[in-house]
Image (cartoon, coloured by chain):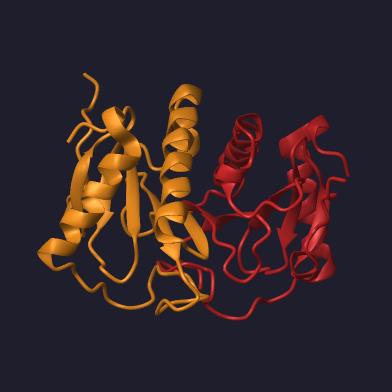
Chain colours: A red, B orange
Amino acid sequence: MSEQFELDPRLAADSILIGRLPLSVLLLFNDARYPWYVLVPQRAAISEVFQLSDADQQQLWRESAILARHLMQSFHADKINIGALGNLVPQLHVHHVARFSSDPAWPGPVWGHSPAQPYAKQGIGERVGMACDWFGSDLRV
Amino acid sequence: MSEQFELDPRLAADSILIGRLPLSVLLLFNDARYPWYVLVPQRAAISEVFQLSDADQQQLWRESAILARHLMQSFHADKINIGALGNLVPQLHVHHVARFSSDPAWPGPVWGHSPAQPYAKQGIGERVGMACDWFGSDLRV
């Protein structure tokens, strides 16, 4: 019997679930200091990109490119950082962070820099709404 | 007149040039503590994955998947970390690092952790030779 995908509870605890794309769950990482979204392919027992089928890899990177392009444009970011690390949470998840030369971790990585500063409720609504605009009908909320 | 691709001198200074894949230059990052390779798409004036054509994006991620799979298998790594950051060097480059629960930066990211420890000459030869095996005739050295 094949295992079903379930979002890792640590990812769920650190983020706000926005919705489901054709392949990935889209999360807003709960750190108000950075526009920071995470894609989690809805496939069980996968910790590395290369473990996905070729078709799923292509879909993951399509979703990633849409996300990164809109992050850059909507926030006028200086740089987009994309990272698939997973040393603490092995379930495959790909971070997308809009970076600014004025942000707290610049020019270093955001991962491991300092504790997250959770959103106030209205901040969540705005950033979730933006993602809905970016993905349109591809996003099921 | 279209600009020609030239490897950023900071990337060149921090690494050993292994050869050229269909899309990317393959570099060995000069830090002997981690099996750490970098793909740099040979396209001028590109700093984000989404700025590549769709065909180039697919080729980049094909090269990335081959690299990551072999890194995992050859080094029996605990995790592969993939990162496209570029806050310091905007030229698009994608890091691939074999990570171990025993390595100096675990479980944090390698970027920004501590100064690189350059290879002794024989260490370079071994890791370059492995990459030649992984990519075969796709790699022009």
Q: Is residue B23 left or right of residue A59?
A: left
Residue at x 80% of width, y 61% of height: A16
Give the position of the C terminus of chain A as an image quadrant.
top right
Q: Is residue A121 left or right of residue B90?
A: right
Is residue B42 visible in the rendered structure shown here? no
Q: Residue lying farthest top?
A: B1
Residue B29 placement: quadrant:
bottom left
Q: Residue lying farthest front?
A: A1
Residue at x 33% of width, y 36% of height: B135
The percent position of residue B118, horizontal first and vertical second, equals: 19, 69
State the count of labels.
0
Q: In this view, does B74 lie above or below B101?
A: above
The percent position of residue A127, horizontal first and vertical second, equals: 74, 54
Is residue B113 visible in the rendered structure shown here? yes
Residue A115 placement: quadrant:
bottom right
Residue B36 placement: quadrant:
bottom left
Q: Is residue A72 above or below residue A33?
A: above
Q: Nearer the viewer, residue B39 or A121?
A: B39
The percent position of residue A126, horizontal first and vertical second, equals: 78, 55
Q: In this view, does A54 lie above or below B14?
A: above
Residue at x 41% of width, y 36% of height: B63
Q: In this view, does A123 lie to the left or right of B7?
A: right
Q: Nearer the viewer, residue A87 or B2?
A: A87
